[in-house]
Image (tube, helix red, strand yellow):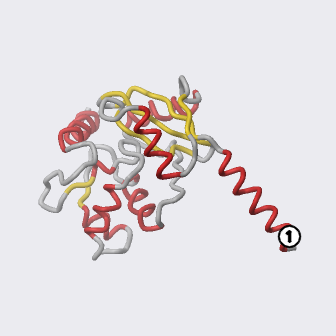
């Protein structure tokens, strides 16, 4: 029995190692967006006007250990789901590959996915949502390591005083994303 398990584990490890993430550029809500995906879901994103393809691929590899290749386009169903998410602000049609993240990080990012478009929450709100009310600073740290910005909408999380707080791509980008979502929600 253990030989079978060992062989299966080795096969699973080989399959994971041999997996190549695909990266394509799409038009995002405030400029081009690199989107990395694999058979488990979206595993990375970044603003194409703020980070080169080579740097994005390098950071993706450093985080996942998997190779990545540029492709001309995303699969049609994924592209369509992303387009609908940009139009509506909803992320329920998208799947994400959070492998390598801690359970705490995953819970923070999943809490962000539950924040409705056009609305915001505070770091403290997210901490309470994940049943860790004293982990406000840790929530901020987890948001700062979100590997899938925009699609996992960490930009919807603000400081308790209502100020923007940090954002990996700068407060101006965060404000533009929030303004765009507020306009769409009001329409």
Looking at the picture, tell me which residue is in the foreground, 172 or 87.
Answer: 172
Quarter of the rendering occupied by the N terminus: bottom right
Between 56 and 170, the one nearer to me in the picture: 56
Residue at the spot x=45%, y=61% of the render?
106
Image quadrant where residue 47 sits: top left
Residue 109 image-quadrant placement? bottom left
Q: Is residue 187 above or below residue 44?
A: above
For residue 170, side relative to residue 154 (left or right):
left
Residue at position x 43%, y 27% in the image: 26
Residue at position x 49%, y 30% in the image: 24
Query: For this view, does 13 lie left or right of residue 187?
Result: right
Quadrant including the C terminus: top left
Vertical placement of residue 108 versus 168, above or below: below
Label 1 belongs to which residue? 3
Q: Looking at the picture, how far across and down is residue 65, in whole percent? A: 55, 51
Q: Residue furthest top?
A: 72
Q: Is residue 41 left or right of residue 137?
A: right
Q: Position of residue 55 (x, y in %)?
A: 40, 38
């Amino acid at each position: 029995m253990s030989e079978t398990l060992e062989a299966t584990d080795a096969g699973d490890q080989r399959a994971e190692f041999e997996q190549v993430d695909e990266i394509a550029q799409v038009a995002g809500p405030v400029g081009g967006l690199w989107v990395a995906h694999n058979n488990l879901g979206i595993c990375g994103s970044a603003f194409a006007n703020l980070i080169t393809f080579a740097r994005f691929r390098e950071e993706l590899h450093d985080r996942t250990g998997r190779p990545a290749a540029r492709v001309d386009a995303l699969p049609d169903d994924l592209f369509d789901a992303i387009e609908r998410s940009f139009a509506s602000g909803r992320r329920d049609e998208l799947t994400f590959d959070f492998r390598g993240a801690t359970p705490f990080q995953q819970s923070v990012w999943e809490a962000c996915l539950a924040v409705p478009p056009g609305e915001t929450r505070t770091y403290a709100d997210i901490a309470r949502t994940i049943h860790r009310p004293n982990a406000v600073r840790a929530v901020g740290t987890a948001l700062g390591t979100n590997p899938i910005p925009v699609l996992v909408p960490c930009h919807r999380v603000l400081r308790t005083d209502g100020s923007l707080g940090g954002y990996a791509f700068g407060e101006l980008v965060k404000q533009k994303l929030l303004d765009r979502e507020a306009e769409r929600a009001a329409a």
